[in-house]
Image (cartoon, grey):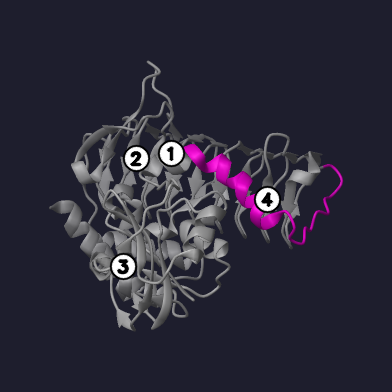
């Protein structure tokens, strides 16, 4: 049985993050959405159906995966936004061929005898018009907004620990001078280096420290928390509960209830809370964000599909920052601020509301970050990690620039 994980038409709900990645590549807990679905189905090999804007980039990055290609044969299709669980997996495995589950216009899943074809997420749904929509008493829950990930991150770190890490080989061999609370709630990968004075407190939730992580002296890590492969936690850092850090990041200062994708840096002092950062983000020294309004009311957040702010339904929302955006030293970011792709921001003025992609300058004096200048800097940044920007990436960033200018 083949497995296809598909993005649906709610991609815009997660802008600016999904301007450069599939919805299925959004991280919550330890895993990305597509990784969690594939693991629940016990599938190492699966196809991804994504928006056509991202197809060339994904085929370049994942040359061993099937992108927007379906193999012939019996195939299960699963929406990447679905909050997967064991009961759902059991249900779909028992479904007959030619059946689907569609609720309020949202395709949850389908099971068909597929034909070999190339297809993108925009055209996928039409292929299931003839399927029988079966009734079930099971409730299905979807990821609707980026701040949902922030709100549920602690829960998913805990679940991922027990589902995927608890029984894995654990290289729990710490140096003298490291303080550990509740050691059975800690998983440490191979090649991890933890310096004296570090405190790992897993009393309230698991701490997962992945392969080749380096934790420098006197850092404090409180679970639930995940630190991705080859990341560095700086001297004296305070990493609080609900934090997921992707691979090859450098993180210092104070971080709480935040998700950070790979290759992003927050090396210095400053508070980052209830936030979601893309890749290649860099926060300057003493950059701080607010995640709670002074009047304790729900935070309103700019929402791309409506081109206006909407009520997040949450008291705590910090900032959401797209790939390759940067702040200078001593920047202050207001509650619920959205910062697009490729921004370069500095100054003493409060960064607030919505900053469009490729913005350059200080709040109130924003100008366009010229695309060629952005690409030059981004290439320098990636070169520091022995990577480079391909022509396909450049094409995508130019398309995003044009989209934001409309």
Relative depth, front residue between 215 and 154? 154
CA neighbours of label 4 inside 10 A, class few (<14), some (14 to 19), many (20+): few
Q: Is residue 355 left or right of residue 377?
A: left
Question: Under tag 2, what secondary structure?
Answer: loop
Of label 2 and label 4, which has the lower sequence position?
4
Residue 287: percent from left, percent from top: 45, 36
Image vertical order of residue 299 relative to residue 367, above or below:
above
Is there CB contact under 8 Å for labels 3 and 1?
no
Is there CB contact under 8 Å for labels 1 and 2?
yes
Q: Which mark is residue 347?
A: none
Question: Under tag 4, what secondary structure?
Answer: helix
Q: What is the C-alpha distance between the residues marked 3 and 1?
A: 33 Å
Q: Which mark is residue 329?
A: 1
Q: Residue at x 68, y 34 (%)?
A: 204
Relative depth, front residue between 210 and 382? 210
Q: Which residue was labeled with disc 2?
A: 346
Count the labels in the image: 4
Task: Decide whether residue 404 is among the magenta residues.
Answer: no
Boundaries of the magenta span: 151-177
Of label 3 and label 1, which has the lower sequence position?
3
Question: Under tag 1, what secondary structure?
Answer: loop
Residue 155: percent from left, percent from top: 57, 41
The quadrant holding residue 57 is bottom left
Q: Which mark is residue 162?
A: 4
Q: Which residue was labeled with disc 3?
A: 54
Observer able to see residue 13: yes
Residue 161: percent from left, percent from top: 66, 50
Residue lying farthest right? Answer: 176
Of label 1 and label 4, which has the lower sequence position?
4
């Amino acid at each position: 049985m083949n497995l296809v994980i598909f993005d649906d038409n709610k991609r815009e709900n997660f802008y600016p993050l999904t301007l450069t990645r599939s919805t299925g590549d959004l991280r919550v807990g330890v895993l990305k959405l597509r990784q969690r679905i594939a693991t629940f189905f016990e599938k190492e090999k699966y196809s991804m159906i994504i928006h056509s804007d991202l197809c060339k980039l994904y085929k370049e990055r994942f040359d061993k995966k099937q992108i927007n290609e379906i193999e012939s044969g019996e195939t299960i299709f699963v929406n990447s936004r679905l909050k997967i669980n064991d009961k759902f997996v059991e249900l779909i495995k028992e479904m007959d061929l030619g059946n689907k589950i569609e609720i309020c216009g949202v395709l949850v899943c389908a099971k068909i005898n597929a034909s070999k074809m190339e297809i993108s997420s925009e055209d996928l749904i039409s292929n299931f018009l003839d399927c029988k929509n079966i009734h079930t008493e099971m409730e299905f829950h979807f990821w609707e907004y980026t701040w949902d990930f922030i709100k549920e991150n602690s829960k998913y770190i805990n679940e991922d620990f027990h589902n995927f890490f608890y029984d894995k080989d654990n290289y729990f061999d710490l140096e003298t001078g490291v303080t550990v609370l509740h050691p059975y709630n800690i998983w440490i990968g191979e090649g991890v280096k933890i310096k004296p004075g570090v405190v790992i407190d897993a009393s309230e939730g698991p701490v997962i420290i992945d392969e080749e992580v380096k934790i420098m002296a006197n850092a404090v890590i409180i679970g639930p928390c995940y630190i991705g492969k080859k990341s560095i936690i700086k001297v004296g850092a305070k990493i609080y509960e609900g934090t997921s850090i992707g691979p090859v990041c450098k993180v210092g200062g104070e971080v709480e209830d935040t998700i950070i994708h790979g290759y992003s840096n927050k090396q210095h002092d400053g508070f980052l809370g209830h936030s979601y950062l893309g890749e290649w983000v860099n926060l300057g020294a003493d950059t701080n964000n607010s995640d709670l309004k002074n009047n304790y009311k729900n935070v309103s957040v700019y929402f791309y599909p409506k081109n206006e702010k909407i009520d997040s339904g949450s008291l705590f929302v910090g900032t959401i920052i797209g790939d390759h955006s940067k702040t200078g030293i001593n920047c202050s970011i207001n509650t619920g601020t959205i910062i697009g792709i490729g921004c370069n921001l500095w100054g003493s003025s409060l960064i607030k509301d919505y900053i469009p992609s490729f913005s350059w300058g200080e709040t109130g004096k924003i100008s366009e970050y010229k695309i060629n200048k952005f690409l030059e800097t981004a290439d320098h940044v990636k070169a520091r990690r022995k990577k480079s920007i391909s022509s396909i990436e450049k094409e995508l960033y130019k398309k995003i620039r044009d989209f934001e200018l409309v």
